[in-house]
Amino acid sequence: MDFRHHIALPSKLSTLAADSLVVVVAGAQADETLDPVLRQALDSALKSGDFQFKAGRTLYLHGLAGVKASRIVFTAAAHATPKAFKAAVAAALAVLKSGGGKQVAVALSGGGVSAAHAEVLVAAASEATYVYRHTKPSAPAEPAFRGFGLVCVKSEVTEVQKGLVLGQALAAGVTLARECANRPGNQCTPTFLADQAKKLGRSHGLKVEVLDRKAVEKLGMGAFLAVAKGSDEPLRFIVARYEGAPKSQAPVVLVGKGITFDSGGISIKPAGEMDEMKFDMGGAASVLGTLRAVAELKPALNLVVVIPACENLPSGRAVKPGDVVTSMSGQTIEILNTDAEGRLILCDALTYVERFKPAVVVDVATLTGACVIALGHHHSGLFTNDDDLAIQLLSAGRDALDTCWRMPLDEEYDECLKSNFADIPNVGPRAGGSITAAMFLKRFTVKYRWAHLDVAGTAWKSGHHKGSTGRPVGLLTHFVLSQQTKR
Ligand code: BES
Ligand code: MN
Ligand code: ZN
């Protein structure tokens, strides 16, 4: 898709060369500077009740005399904020989707567009055109959109350009994450994830290393191995590095949970909706997507992405409740529930990354059903004891419209994690399940600044719109970019 800017004043929108013109009207009344032809059409629709200044409302007009674009969509936004602007653009694109317009010009009536508006325009366009097709060639055709332009004035061009570039890198990252996560478990295997990382390495000049079972055994990753051993599908431990700064500069490290299917293992899950556990590699998909976005933007920093990937299945060789394993850190773990496998593969990855002497480590995981109960599907769960890091991640989420909400990690919760047979059990009581999962990970992260994102409620959608969301690629990319200026 082609993204550009159009320099135009609100009074000249009728002369814009585009197939479709989207006019976002924010607030409660029409803007005085709006082109008179458009203003008249809008006023008449307001009078007749065909349009209202109410977020979500749209008005489609075809072949309006005196306007060059043959299609016009007025779309109401509660505010001129990027968030409201994005929702209004999305509503307009839903209207235009089934039509034939290829070139779409988008204007914010009243003006005042920023880099953030440009960024979210690209996101809305990308979301409106994404169709999963890999295992469904008969899926409906993509909309005819070929290019988008954002109307701005000369002084806004530099910012708008920046926003368009960031938006495109983000869209590429989000799309990669969605494409990986939407694939069925029989195709998106640990080996597939490793191949995706290698492919990204070749196209973007990254160093990619893939460890197999033997190498993982040598490292002493007893927890990761315990999960992987129930499946015949070979495990992979993926390490990919983007180097945009001198080697001496401490890297940002992202760790993504890569369970390509989670049956629960011997502690097997109920059958209903178990298919959705193919999305249990959403954390892995999001760190790969972030790596792609970052590699396209080429910021001056170092980034390491680490993915422990395997399946969690029951079998004659599977790990059993009560088994005790030794993690790479040396701590022994009593596996009381084989369905709490995410923390087992992550804890060894979190020990492994110590070797990078990281500036900061963020792990991303579809870790607990309890997090979905706590936060629903709007915010991801954020866990960290580092207040500065929390502020940075919260604000990255707000900037990306991919938000997270901070959860507690007080020492008191540690009392739930006691075992008579090992240093730590892999589960605590049901209450506060997402917190005890984070407390478990915390035992393996004492050597660096660390945060954990539980994306169980945000990485995919269920029901009619079942599919990966690509979250939290937006949050993570904004966060990684923000680390550039921090040091
Ligand atoms: N992948 C699941 C978490 C999950 C469940 C995400 C439902 C999204 C929807 C994870 O591996 C898991 O099974 N967690 C258990 C932990 C429990 C056994 C302590 C859970 O949440 O039930
Ligand atoms: Mn599980
Ligand atoms: Zn899982």
Image (cartoon, rainbow, N blue to C red):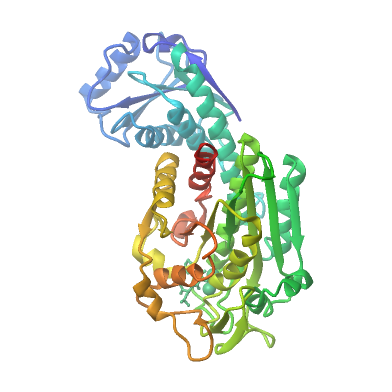
Q: Nearer the viewer, residue 271 or 421?
A: 421
Residue situated furthest front in the rendering: 248
Q: In terms of image quadrants, where is residue 193? A: bottom right
Task: Residue 93: give x, y in percent of width and height.
Answer: 46, 33
Q: Nearer the viewer, residue 55 or 101?
A: 55
State the residue at coordinates (77%, 69%).
215
**Location of residue 77 with respect to 277 vertically, above or below:** above
State the residue at coordinates (37%, 13%).
10
Task: Residue 223: give x, y in percent of width and height.
Answer: 62, 76
Task: Residue 403: give x, y in percent of width and height.
Answer: 40, 48
State the residue at coordinates (77%, 44%).
202
Task: Residue 394: give x, y in percent of width and height.
Answer: 40, 48
Q: Is residue 149 visible?
A: no
State which quarter of the image contains the N terminus. top right
Q: In terms of image quadrants, where is residue 45? A: top left
Q: Is residue 162 visible?
A: yes
State the residue at coordinates (38%, 32%).
85
